Amino acid sequence: MVEITSNTDALEAVRTVRQVRQYEEGAVSPDDLNQILEIARWTGSSRNTQPWHFVVVDDRRMLKQLSELRENITWVADGALAIAILLPDENPPHEAYDAGRVTERIMIAARFLGLGSGTAWFGEPEREAKAKQLLGVPETMSCHSVVVVGPYITSKDPRPTGPKPGRKSLDELVSYGAYGETR
């Protein structure tokens, strides 16, 4: 659990949310899962449609099967659970926006609870179709990704091609009034 005693603590907790791909053995408590799902439920959506449905996957065999759908998401098998985000597939631009919002909220909630999380995309339509089949998702819905949650290893990313450390400076990312304008 992240201890928050000030606005600065809260901002730091949000700033340090990271994509986690290494998980320790362990479970997510029912209370923690419920809190994460409540945060997801209360996430804002386009026109407050709340278009999502969540499928919680905590079966080790199912996590393994999902992890095999793409070579870049094999780490899914190591999480304590995954939350599949299903959408009605009626308005893809709005739903992509909503999926991004709820994914980030799930990841922030996990961080505040002292858990790690990461989002795994299935990619091509054939792989998404296989994920939908595994999860029993109706044809009329989309399931582009899962958010994996669990206790996490805090060591450095072991991938030789892992992300470069740090962040671009605000001067590189921010303009004021119009593109390219500085203060």
Image (cartoon, rainbow, N blue to C red):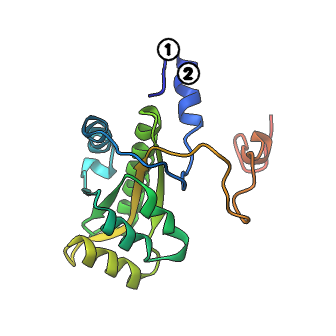
Where residue 180 appears, x then y in whole percent? 78, 49
128 relative to 22, above or below: below
Q: Secondary structure at mark 1?
A: loop
Disc 2 crowd rating (10 Å Cα; few below 14, some 14-19, many 20+) is few
Disc 1 crowd rating (10 Å Cα; few below 14, some 14-19, many 20+) is few
116 relative to 57, above or below: above
Q: Residue at horizontal 27%, vertical 75%?
A: 134
The quadrant in which residue 16 appears is top right
Q: Nearer the viewer, residue 64 or 46?
A: 64
* Three-letter residue code for mark 1: Thr
Where residue 139 appears, x then y in whole percent? 22, 78
Q: Residue at horizontal 64%, vertical 46%?
A: 155
Q: Nearer the viewer, residue 108 or 65?
A: 65
- Image quarter where the C terminus lies is top right
Where residue 69 appears, x then y in whole percent? 43, 77
157 left or right of 139 in image: right
Q: Residue at horizontal 54%, vertical 54%?
A: 22
Q: Secondary structure at mark 2?
A: helix
Query: Which mark identifies residue 106?
Result: none
Q: Residue at horizontal 47%, vertical 37%?
A: 111
Q: Which residue extends farthest bottom? A: 126
The quadrant in which residue 39 appears is top left
* Three-letter residue code for mark 2: Asp
CB-based contact (under 8 Å), mark 1 and mark 2: yes
27 left or right of 21 in image: left
Q: CA distance from mark 1 to mark 2?
A: 6 Å
Which residue corresponds to mark 2?
9
> How many marks are shown on the rendered structure?
2
- Image quarter where the N terminus lies is top left
Where residue 79 appears, x then y in whole percent? 42, 55
Q: Nearer the viewer, residue 94 or 129?
A: 129
Which residue corresponds to mark 1?
5
